[in-house]
Image (cartoon, helix red, strand yellow):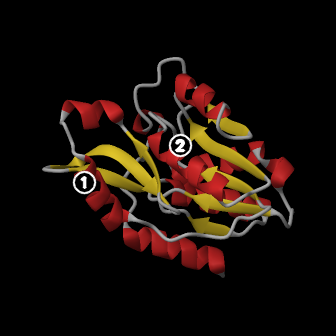
Amino acid sequence: MIFRDRSSAGQQLARQLSAYANRDDVIVLALPRGGVPVACEVAVALHAPLQVYVVRKLRTPGQPELAMGAIAPGGVRVLNQEVVDALRIAGEEIDREAAVQQPARIDAKNATVLLVDDGLATGSTMRAAIAAIRQLEPARVVVAVPVGASDTCRELERLADEVVCASIPEEFSSVGRWYLDFHQVSDDEIRELLARHAR
């Protein structure tokens, strides 16, 4: 299944999440950046509150585009041990980068939390988000994405209470392959989407 764009993907994903509509305990958490347009559509369809859940990439020293892991609110870290070992990254360097990237906490106690992104490739960001949300004592954690790699979806089923993936292609390759429009989501676009949702 090829999605027109993230908004269209969010509308299709929302149909598979209809059991969570009109419930007081549900919170939709968007993983930025790409998850925000998807999550906005899900939150509108389910009549649920929306928040952006910031899981930040831990940048490799000297190679900021290469992630050595991710950090979520509450200080939860998921490291890519292969990268850390291959580049011999010291613990102090990881601690320094984690201190810079540390996001703020949110309140999810006893809530049913829908963690929404635009897709799952390796799943490192989602794993960090799940671990962080678990610390907040939610009633239930649901991973919701339009498209995902089958191995990653299976792995996350062991960590989340439920994984809802609208499409699990046999040959995945990358998230962007399954969108006609997969542009980089800008800060302005995120602000506009959140403002529109708040109205």
Left or right, residue 121 beside residue 13: left
- Of residues 180 and 121, the one drawn nearer to the viewer in this rendering: 121
Residue 52 image-quadrant placement: bottom right
- Of residues 6 and 50, the one drawn nearer to the viewer in this rendering: 50
Label 2 sits on residue: 127
Residue depicted at x 67% and y 61%: 136
- The residue tagged with tag 1: helix, strand or loop? helix
- Of residues 114 and 85, the one drawn nearer to the viewer in this rendering: 85
Instruction: Look at the image and tell me in which quarter the C terminus lies.
Output: bottom right
N-term mark: 1 or 2: 1
Mark 1 residue crowding within 10 angstroms, few (<14) / some (14–19) / many (20+): few
Give me the C-alpha separation between circle 1 and circle 2: 23 Å
Furthest residue to the bottom? Answer: 199
Label 1 sits on residue: 92
Where residue 10 appears, x then y in whole percent?
Answer: 62, 51
Left or right, residue 24 beside residue 176: right
Left or right, residue 185 beside residue 16: left
